[in-house]
Image (cartoon, rainbow, N blue to C red):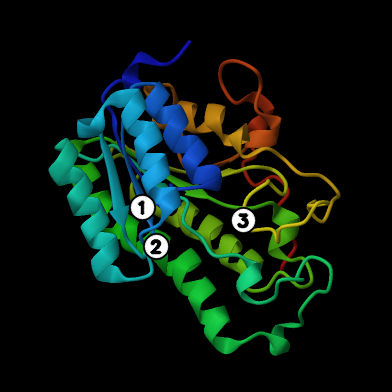
Amino acid sequence: MTDASLQGRAVLITGGSRGLGREMALALAEAGARVAITGASASDALQATWAELAALVGEANVLALVSDVSNAFQAQAAVTDTVAAFGRIDVLVNNAGLGMRLISETFNTQPTKFWEADAGAWSDIVATNVNGPFLAAKVAAPIMVAQGFGKIINVSTSAITMIRTGYAPYGPTKAFLEAASRVWAADLEGTGVDVNVLLPGGATDTDLLPPSPNKRGADGNLLSPDIVRAPVLWLASDASNGVTGSRFIARHWPDEGAPGAAKDDHGTPPQIM
């Protein structure tokens, strides 16, 4: 049963045109939320996902925004445009991200040493994956605090990926985001704004992996991107009110109800020092 609190809830999902972002957007729209999605540039995928969402909740309840989250002005505009359209912003899902294909199209079979990486590609990944969530949350958080309610959901990756050979800087940017999420949760304690981390729990069938008839993650598995649907519905709903500073692994989510074993409060963080 869908949580009634999601009816009319105003949600902004960065990187919402495809992959995990698209699945989360569709799940929330099906639950009755008003959904804004961003793409770094105008694209057929952004328009197609907008049309899918509009068919679910009506054009007035859907927004498709061209926004490069690594750009402070564009990130701010995404939040303010969402508020202008929906009257508020209840949920920010920081999903937009760049992966290792920017470094090498064969990163998952022929790891690139960090010193071999193009400096420009490295900087772009860091700017999107580290600065992007901050720039969006920097604008959204004060609005949520003034409302006395809000949810910030930061999309991460598996702990092993953070330190896997050949996955720099992508993996380390997610380690940063998880650490930052804990700080943000502490900063927002008592305000009614919750901050949590959500990750699939393994490689998913998205554009972060190079196209291949045998597409698989480093562990040999490949998850469907719809694995994040149930977790994001719970995290965006009133059922998760007061749950903050936590980490949730979608692969371990139960068929129904609360997260159970999917909640991983950093019990086994990567040994990076």
Number of on-image labels: 3
Q: Please state the horizontal and vertical placement of residue 246, each as a whole percent of the image.
A: 54, 41
Q: Secondary structure at mark 2?
A: loop
Does the residue at mark 1 contact the one at mark 2 (Cβ under 8 Å)?
yes
Q: Few, some or many C-alpha atoms within 10 Å of disc 1 (few <14, some 14-19, many ≥20)? A: many
Q: Mark 3 belongs to which amino acid? A: Asp
Query: Is residue 11 shown above or below 127?
Result: above
Sequence-earlier tag: 3 or 2: 2
Residue holding disc 1: 38
For this view, does 61 lie left or right of residue 173? left
Is 7 positioned to the left or the right of 81 in the image? Answer: right
Q: Quadrant of residue 166?
A: bottom right
At a point 44% along the width and 32% down the height, the residue shown is 26
Find residue 207 and name its label. 3
Q: Are marks 1 and 3 in contact (CB under 8 Å)?
A: no
Q: Is residue 248 above or below residue 30?
A: below
Q: Quadrant of the C terminus?
A: bottom right
Distance between mark 3 and mark 2 Cα atoms:
14 Å
Q: Which mark is residue 40?
A: 2
Mark with earlier residue (1, 3): 1
